[in-house]
Image (cartoon, rainbow, N blue to C red):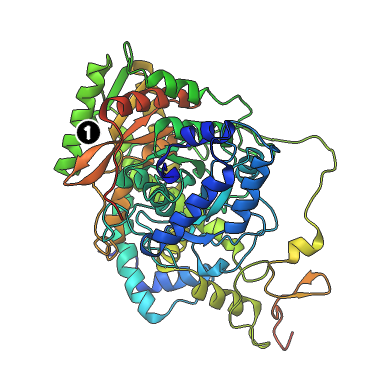
Amino acid sequence: MAAISREEVAHLARLSRLAVTDEELDRFAGQLDVILQSVARVGEVAADDIPPTSHSVPLTNVYRDDVPTESLTQAAALSGAPDAYESRFRVPRILDEED
Amino acid sequence: MTDLTRLSAAALSKMISSKEVSAVEVATAHLDRIDAVDERVHAFLHVDRQGALDAAAAVDRGEITGPLAGVPIAVKDVVATKGVPTTAASKILEGWKPPYDATIVERLKTAGMPILGKTNMDEFAMGSSTEYSAYGPTKNPWDLGRIPGGSGGGSSAAIAAYEAPLAIGTDTGGSIRQPGAVTGTVGAKPTYGSTSRYGLIAFSSSLDTPGPCGRTVEDTALLHAVMAGHDPRDSTSIPQAVPDVVGAARLGATGDLTGVKLGLVKEFAGDGSEAGVTAAFRESLEALVKLGAEIVEISCPNFQYALPAYYLIAPSEASSNLARFDGVRYGLRTGDDGNRSLEEVMSLTREAGFGPEVKRRIILGTYALSSGYYDAYYGQAQKVRTLITRDFQAAFEQVDVLVSPTTPFVAFPFGSRTSDPYQMYLADLFTIPTNLYGGPAISVPCGLSEGLPVGFQIMAPTMADDRMYRVAAALESAVGTFTPPAL
């Protein structure tokens, strides 16, 4: 049985903001199915009472001293923007016409 | 006259500091070599001739001195270089010039190391062959019809082709060590957190580790010492002194390993390795025994689950990290015709800007993190990560280091593993456990199989990076270094 369907891949692509083509959907569905069947092996490990590891360095709450330091200028921060307007990032329409 | 591109970084450094040769001459020799061969090798995505010559001139004026002052270096294109194009080999960042330097780049500059340019890689460091670079693959200097490894194939190929004596790589699942192995060069993944991630374009933040690539163990250690150390701008940076890796490499080079215990991972024996790889590895083990090392067989029962756990954890983190490429703050924007919504423009931009492997991993990671699947996939993978860490900790109570081949196969021909992505993932079988644990590991050339290089991997406990350099240098003293055929 397939671990993942073409419809699920289409849904995940939408969630990931990827406007994938039909051809890609066909290809990715098969490939992701192979990958998922392989990685599902982690489920074979009895690990109910094992704590998860998110990170190998056990550091928490790393703060620096509250001393002002140099940061990027506004011009530098905007230097790579595809579109800027009056010292701000300009974005495409975020509301529907009728809103 | 000596061909400067054939010398080690250590030798170049001595000649520059004694004024036998100028830093500008050394940089020029490497830039000329790049001009002569890179059309065929394609190790570089961008060459910064003027920047390199300016930095070299500053060394010649006596403005900077130090152990690697004037020794040129190539930097993987996933590391931010101020004002110099940085793309992570992706179309989504084509033409982007970072407004700041990564901490490791700052350290190279402070050390007086001229940066020759930016090296090719698999897009966003996802891959084992550079075939997923959006700008075309790098060729292996040993055989231009074969892959140079990945993701850092450009960095390793550049040093194997004598285009640079040293290079910077990043290792998330083996991206420094596997390219080192298949190009006959040295590559080290330092302890996670001992080299700064600030300014590194993030792939999998709990695993990404910048590290050094060189043609000799000593050169690699010299670069390791320059780039490592605590960085307050990286919240996972370890606030401890870096072990003396250069001293350890020099100690190892004396060829005495009396009393050193090498753990042979039982689960890796005969696990899909090519016969030639296994043979070269076994001969190297015998060489190390002759130097006084003791071999102890060690069981690490959870290592077999490292590859599946990694291919859940890394894509999960990537799916989150790559959300930043939204067509707003930097890089590509596609389809903004004044009518389309932000969401439509974002989806079209990401569709046009990302290559197939990046899309697969984003989708896979999004799946593993979705409600209903999270516990079975991402959550379970994190528990397996704990068990793998415990395997390492138990092993290091019995032995000083663990050893294995670096990768199961020698450089493979282009196109042979791209149709089934999982076949590509198998290149990382032996390198991934270390990333999940966070300790250091190094790949050192140990022999040839049918004329192609084989790598020997040494894994050490967290913050004991010096141990692996000692064993690596000892092995190098026994088997020598390996030179590819003339290009």
Q: In this view, does B246 lie above or below B279?
A: above
Q: Where is residue B124 in the image (x, y as percent from the top left)?
A: 49, 58
Q: Residue furthest front?
A: B1
Give how far across and how far down residue B288 sits, in percent. Answer: 26, 22
Q: Can residue A41 be seen in this view?
A: no
Q: In this view, does B35 lie to the left or right of B402?
A: right
**Res. A83 image quadrant:** bottom right
Left or right? Give the position of B2 relative to B428: right
Name the amino acid type tagged 1: Phe
Nearest to the observer: residue B243 or residue B475: B475
Q: How many numbered marks are there?
A: 1
Classify residue A96 as left or right of residue B383: right
Point 37% across, 47% down: residue: B160
Among the 4 quarters of the image, the one containing residue B346:
bottom right
- Quadrant location of the N terminus of chain B in the rendered image: top left
Check the image and name the residue furthest to the top: B259
List x then y, in percent, for residue A93: 70, 81
As displayed, is residue B239 above or below residue B420?
A: above
**Residue B173: horizontal and vertical position, in percent?**
41, 45
Read off the residue under disc 1: B281
Q: Give the class, few, some or many, for how many residues have Cα within 10 Å of label 1's Cα (few <14, many ≥20).
A: many
Q: Could you tell me which secondary element the residue under label 1 belongs to?
A: helix
User: Front-most of B316 and B8?
Assistant: B8
Tell me which chain the residue with mark 1 is part of: B
Q: Residue at x 79, y 70 (%)?
A: A88
Q: In which quarter of the image is residue A62?
A: top right
Instruction: Pick the quarter of the image with the C terminus of chain B.
Output: bottom left
Residue B236 visible in the displayed image = yes
